[in-house]
Amino acid sequence: MEARPHILIVDDSADVTGALRVLFEETGNDVSVANTIRDAVAVADARIIDVMLLDLTLPDGDGLTVLATMHDLTVAGEYADRLVLLADGRVVADGPPDEALNGDRIRDVFAVEPDLLPDGPWTRRPSTASRDG
């Protein structure tokens, strides 16, 4: 049996999450609901998320914190076939990780000086690490 896509709905409105859950489950998706940033991160740590619908105003902070918490450039570079890199609400790169995550682009978008590490044992793609921590 093929795995169903997993959708995470992050919203503090029970009306919104209830309606979206019904819609997505009826169309054959597996759905998780989180009402806070903490709950969203817990779900993402426990399961692979295919799609996330994210409310930007949550009771425990700005919904963008969820995205910042979940992204890791090294993991993205190792596991993704395609990356879409956003900055200031616009797409700045769309393609394979080795093209989307080059040193100049990481420096420009994230304002850090990246160390591009040699290929690791788990991947043929470059890993990234920031000197800033």
Image: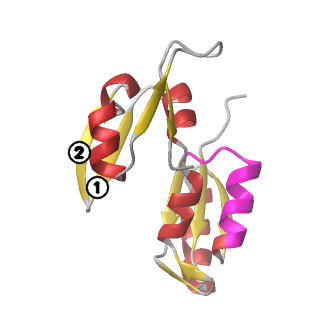
| 41 in magenta | yes
Work out whether residue 18 or residue 42 is closer to the camera in this orientation and state it.
42
* Structural distance between the alpha carbons of marks 1 and 2: 6 Å
Q: Quadrant of residue 26?
A: bottom right
Q: Residues within 10 Å of mark 2 (few under 14, many from 20)?
A: few
User: Magenta span: helix, strand or loop, mainly?
Assistant: helix
Q: Which segment did they paint magenta?
A: 38-50
- Left or right: 49 as drawn, with respect to 129: right
Q: Front-most of 57 and 53?
A: 57
Q: What kind of element bears circle 2?
A: strand
Q: Amino acid at mark 1?
A: Ala
Q: Are marks 1 and 2 in contact (CB under 8 Å)?
A: yes
Spot occupied by residue 15 in the image (x, y as percentages of width and height): 58, 85
Name the residue that disc number 1 marks.
87
Place of residue 9 in the rendered image (x, y in percent of width and height, measured from the top left) = 58, 66
Q: Quadrant of the N terminus?
A: top right
Q: Earlier in the sequence, mark 1 or mark 2?
A: 1
Q: Which residue is mark 2?
A: 92
Identified at 53% across, 49% down, the residue is 71
Q: Quadrant of residue 84?
A: top left
In this view, the residue in front, 89 or 125, is 125
Is 69 positioned to the left or the right of 81 in the image? right
Position of residue 103 relative to residue 55, above or below, is above
Q: At x 58% / y 70%, what residue is drawn?
A: 10
Other-residue count near label 1 (Cα within 10 Å), few / some / many at <14 / 14–19 / ≥20: few
Q: Is residue 59 above or below residue 66?
A: below
| Amino acid type at mark 2 | Val
Q: Residue at x 27, y 47 (%)?
A: 108
Looking at the rendered structure, the number of numbered marks drawn on it comes to 2
Q: Is residue 33 above or below residue 13?
A: above
